[in-house]
Image (tube, rainbow, N blue to C red):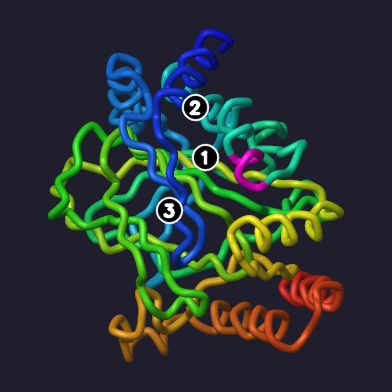
């Protein structure tokens, strides 16, 4: 792994990282890994069906035709990207942008902190507009501040859709579409308004959209410093509240995506309840009050 870290450090040194602030800060790094290394990883990802155990298969109208694989199920080359994007070099890139110290990645925790690093999506798949969990499952005082997505399909035609979508702060308007080009890495800064998703896929049968994802965290007590840094450095006003992962329930890919039938989906009520709780916390309550609201929601669904 030390050798891999040296390779990544060298690649980062040679790549020009340009952060774009609209709709929220993100950066695109093409040709992230050397060709030979990427081909090994990509070939391995294409054979993931040999991993018999996947953790979930999503079939709702906002999470469709997607499988996720657990950290302990990934072996050999299939495991490499988890160590790479969760490693020291990429954490330093994000620390430098945010001007914080002690960044923690999901890879620093046993069993990936309870989340799943590798995702595949079949044709007709999508992931609706959502904001990820605000805090770690492992530690409720660790604030989620950044994400990475690494595209590892062996090939991807731009006509196959599946773009990563970045939405405006309400999650109702698509601002940016990022093609899941092989060997492309994207980084983005996460807050309570960083809505993102995946456009509907049109890939042929036998081709899957394969990605790795990583979350990064800081201690809650650094939040005030973080907000001051970003305001001073980039004139950004990021909002943070306590919430679980929240989807836009009826407009999952923007206003034009409304489907009357989705109102009657058995999962819609759950999405609406979580979304309303998020809206109350975001617009009517302060940060500390949103902690209590989140706890109430967790107790409600555990009963």
Q: Nearer the viewer, mark 3 or mark 1?
A: 1
Res 255 → quadrant: bottom left
Secondary element at tag 1: loop
Residue 272, compared with residue 157, is above or below; it is: below
Mark identifier at residue 271: none
- Magenta stretch encompasses residue 33: no
User: For the residues marked 2 and 3, what is the alpha-carbon distance in whole angstroms?
Assistant: 17 Å
Res 287 → quadrant: bottom right
Q: Nearer the viewer, mark 1 or mark 2?
A: 1
Residue 192: image location, x then y, percent: 63, 68
Q: Which residue position holds label 3?
A: 57
Front residue of 69 and 3: 3
Packing grade of label 1 (10 A; few <14, some 14-19, many >=20) is many
User: For the residues marked 1 and 2, what is the alpha-carbon distance in whole angstroms?
Assistant: 9 Å
Q: Are marks 3 and 1 in contact (CB under 8 Å)?
A: no
Q: Which residues lie in the magenta part?
A: 94-98
Name the residue located 72 percent from the left edge and 34 percent from the top edge.
109
Packing grade of label 3 (10 A; few <14, some 14-19, many >=20) is some
Q: Are marks 1 and 2 in contact (CB under 8 Å)?
A: yes
- Magenta stretch encompasses residue 95: yes
Q: Which residue position holds label 2?
A: 74
Residue 112: image location, x then y, percent: 64, 37
Residue 276: image location, x then y, percent: 63, 85
Q: Is residue 5 left or right of residue 16?
A: right
Counting residues from the N terminus, which is met first, the one under dot 3 or under dot 1? Answer: 3
Residue 20, compared with residue 183, is above or below; it is: below
């Amino acid at each position: 792994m030390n050798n891999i870290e040296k390779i990544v450090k060298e690649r980062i040194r040679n790549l020009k990282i340009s952060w774009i602030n609209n709709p929220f800060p993100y950066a695109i790094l093409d040709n992230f890994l050397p060709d030979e290394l990427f081909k090994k990883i990509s070939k391995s990802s294409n054979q993931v069906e040999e991993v018999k155990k996947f953790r979930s298969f999503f079939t709702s109208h906002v999470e469709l035709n997607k499988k996720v694989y657990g950290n302990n199920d990934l072996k050999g080359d299939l495991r490499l990207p988890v160590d790479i994007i969760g490693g020291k070099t990429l954490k330093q890139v994000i620390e430098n942008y945010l001007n914080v110290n002690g960044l923690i990645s999901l890879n620093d925790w046993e069993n990936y902190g309870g989340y799943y690093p590798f995702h595949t999506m079949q044709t007709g798949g999508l992931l609706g507009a959502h904001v990820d969990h605000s805090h770690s499952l492992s530690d409720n005082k660790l604030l989620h501040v950044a994400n990475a997505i690494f595209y590892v399909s062996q090939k991807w035609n731009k006509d196959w859709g599946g773009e990563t979508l970045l939405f405006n702060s309400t999650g109702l308007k698509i601002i940016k579409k990022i093609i899941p080009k092989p060997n492309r890495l994207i980084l983005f800064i996460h807050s309570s308004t960083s809505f993102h998703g995946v456009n509907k896929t049109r890939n042929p049968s036998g081709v899957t959209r394969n990605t790795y994802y990583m979350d990064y965290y800081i201690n809650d007590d650094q939040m005030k410093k973080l907000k001051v840094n970003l305001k001073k450095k980039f004139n950004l006003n990021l909002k943070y509240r306590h919430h679980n992962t929240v989807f836009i329930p009826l407009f999952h890919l923007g206003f034009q995506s409304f489907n009357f039938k989705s109102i009657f989906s058995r999962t819609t009520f759950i999405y609406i309840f979580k979304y309303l709780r998020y809206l109350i916390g975001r617009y009517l309550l302060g940060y500390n009050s949103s902690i209590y609201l989140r706890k109430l929601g967790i107790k409600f669904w555990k009963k």
